[in-house]
Amino acid sequence: MSLRGKDILGLQEMTPEEILLILDTAEGMKEISEREIKKVPTLRGKTIINLFHEPSTRTRTSFEIAGKRLSADVINISASGSSTVKGETIRDTAHNLEAMSPDVIVVRHSASGVPYLLAQALKTPIINAGDGAHEHPTQALLDLFTIREKRGMLQGLKVTIAGDIAHSRVARSNIFGMTKLGMEVTVAGPATMMPLHIEKLGVRVITNMDEAIAEADVIMMLRLQLERQHQSLFPSLREYSRLYGLNLERLKRAREDLLILHPGPINRGIEIAPEVADGPYSLILQQVSNGVAIRMALLYLVVEGK
Amino acid sequence: MSLRGKDILGLQEMTPEEILLILDTAEGMKEISEREIKKVPTLRGKTIINLFHEPSTRTRTSFEIAGKRLSADVINISASGSSTVKGETIRDTAHNLEAMSPDVIVVRHSASGVPYLLAQALKTPIINAGDGAHEHPTQALLDLFTIREKRGMLQGLKVTIAGDIAHSRVARSNIFGMTKLGMEVTVAGPATMMPLHIEKLGVRVITNMDEAIAEADVIMMLRLQLERQHQSLFPSLREYSRLYGLNLERLKRAREDLLILHPGPINRGIEIAPEVADGPYSLILQQVSNGVAIRMALLYLVVEGK
Amino acid sequence: MSLRGKDILGLQEMTPEEILLILDTAEGMKEISEREIKKVPTLRGKTIINLFHEPSTRTRTSFEIAGKRLSADVINISASGSSTVKGETIRDTAHNLEAMSPDVIVVRHSASGVPYLLAQALKTPIINAGDGAHEHPTQALLDLFTIREKRGMLQGLKVTIAGDIAHSRVARSNIFGMTKLGMEVTVAGPATMMPLHIEKLGVRVITNMDEAIAEADVIMMLRLQLERQHQSLFPSLREYSRLYGLNLERLKRAREDLLILHPGPINRGIEIAPEVADGPYSLILQQVSNGVAIRMALLYLVVEGK
């Protein structure tokens, strides 16, 4: 079995079978990073371009490590130092990169839809590493992988995604993936951070965090993007933290075996208390480890599936 | 046969035989990027340093991919993040890099002559990746390669180079190379963008673009460097585009099998209309592909020729 | 024999035996960079992360080259483009990087103590590539290597370290290492640049430069960090240069076989005259060459010693 299209753009257009194929492939990949010699020749002689138009340590590094462990050549391009300063369109940049015969281009961009645009314009496979507030499929896939690894299955699990739902590509990708795999998704957050008609995506909306946490098997805390202007969305960071942050007090209302996820980077003391982030139920660092495995799987499936 | 000197500084000092050696070598290299496994062990254990003191996506990426496809280790150094912020001279920086035993240093710099300075100061081979308004030899070599690939020969072909000739290192390098290989070169552009005594380089000057295009076998449109102040050189972008841009209307006056080149990044709708850039006579993306092959050839000749 | 701890944090906590082990290991490594094929498979399948929160050409490049000559995968992360812009703590960044299974993290940071913090927080070996005004152990090790290579031994040699001792991590690391290996260390510089109680580190203090140079076997000139505010520390650059710079006139008072070191980047004409920096007694470029060998040795010892 293989993926239907040449690209990884979002979970919205993936079938449940495709998602499971990726998770299964990642299981085999994970073991490679645990070996003494963390390298296989699978993608030797292949060229991966990381085209990052937004800063990112973890995602860029994760893709770079994933590519190198598969023996590919990895080329990093960041927006600064690129032709964008010369006014070239992203589409022309991509066409130019394609002319150098890469096997896959990994794209992060602050504008929603850029990876889709490039996927249509190019024959080269595109992997979306996050586009605006739209999708972040590799994050959602590693989240699903992490939950399945811990629980053994996904179907029927109750998940609460909490925070600024309206601006979160992580939330969107997870909602698509989780509902497709039969999970029950609740979104929690201030009404000002909740997109209109979000229920149409098949999720339940709760604005009371204590209530939202009570029945959840999994809670995914979203990063409060402090770089955005949030003044109009809630009164203060302290107020946000009190009402929507995950702390030890609030955890008392949760199931005993609750799983806690966060896509990182975390804001300690804002959406998540340090004791919770570093506590026994937190899977935050396992998510990062699994991210390498998921990206190895995607690079492999996309390049070898050509 | 091999190159006479240790460096690739400009086409001004190359012999026709050297230019043809590079083009012939690049032909063998081009095929490597079309293989399933795009990698040969030719430069395994060699170290290439990309020292870029000007932003550049395509040239830096092209050199990096070229080096990696030859199995070399490639080290990127950009001006930001370098010792230049600490006030070190470029010459001292280069001496320090040489002390780490690289096999070649690829240099781009905004000041004309820097690669020459370094070539004299160092034993390490230097490849000029563009210096000020002086030379951009790897670009000219890939242009020559692209034309020869399409026409089968170069001698006797009529080429028009159009745009801001005075500030273009691409134009200069091409004029040197093309005249050496027996091509007939015409330069076209506003009088304000034409260097004094340019005829002494063996080219014909025309300021009327329609006339310049009529007999050409090849037209090379130069990028209008919008980042420069051009106010004093022509009235407006619109005026420039009308008088010197390449559009479908103007193309009607051209030979039917005209080849269109542009070093990129292009300004759509300014020096070249989108329909022309993306049209059937445009070789813009082939130029980029061939750039990898040319750079592989140069890295090979310079490193193995030591 | 192997190193006692998992990390390379500073020379303050190293034993003389450990220092000598590193120097001896580097001797074997140096030869690799002199081969036709400068690459050995020692660290194939290992992942090295260069986490640089301060700009640095030479140290980052040196580590990158060292890692690649040992066949490791090297990942560069600089402060710009990293999660620091999103407010993540350096400790959380490091935990996240550790989750991607690197074999060693090389850290440079403007704040003293950061490598120690990370070494305690992580299981991954940490190599300090310079932290604030605290330590720069790999620089001191390459200095020791360079002196020993030239003199055949270290014990009993008289060394003068001259310049801004108070703000120099290079001076501190060298003082620790040199005194441990039985060298006699003198520090010279303006009283305003001399740390209080520096004698307690086992060094002699001299403020007259002519006197300081007279008996020295080795003089190490420190870089005057022009990016700092030095107005309060001395009247003018010219005055500093006259009183503490190393020039041909002053060299006349020195022993005939004096060795001259400088960690670079040098300020020509300020702390060192161009004729001296480029002269026959200068070991500045040998230091850079030996830096690659020292870093290969450290990467090897730290990764294989796990």
Image (tube, coloured by chain):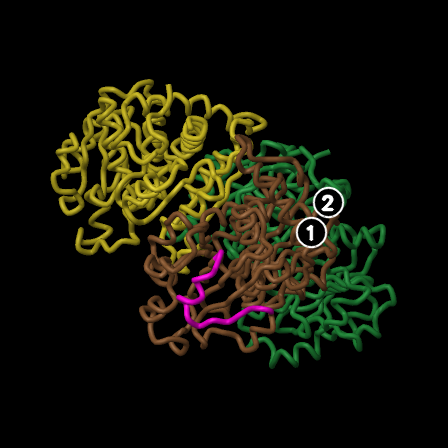
Chain colours: A yellow, B brown, C green
For residue A114: magenta? no
**Which residue is the site of mark 2?**
C33
Packing grade of label 2 (10 A; few <14, some 14-19, many >=20) is many
The part of the chain drawn in magenta is B202-218
> Which sits in the foreground, A180 or A81?
A81
Q: Is residue B81 above or below residue C274?
A: above
- Horizontal side, residue C263 vs residue C101: left or right: right
Q: Mark 2 near mark 1, Cβ–Cβ under 8 Å? A: yes
In what element is the residue under mark 2?
Answer: helix
- Tag 1: residue type? Met
Along the viewing direction, whichever of B39 and B159 lies nearer the viewer: B159
> Disc 2 residue type?
Ser
Where in the figure is residue A95, as x and y percent of width and height? 41, 46
* Residue B163 position by quadrant: bottom left
Who's the residue at 32% across and 49% down the image?
A: A110
As drawn, the residue found furthest toward the right would be C256
Q: Chain of mark 2?
A: C
In the figure, B12 relative to A192: above or below?
A: below
> Dot 1 corresponds to which residue?
B100
- Estimate the x, y position of residue A221 in percent, counting from the top left: 27, 38
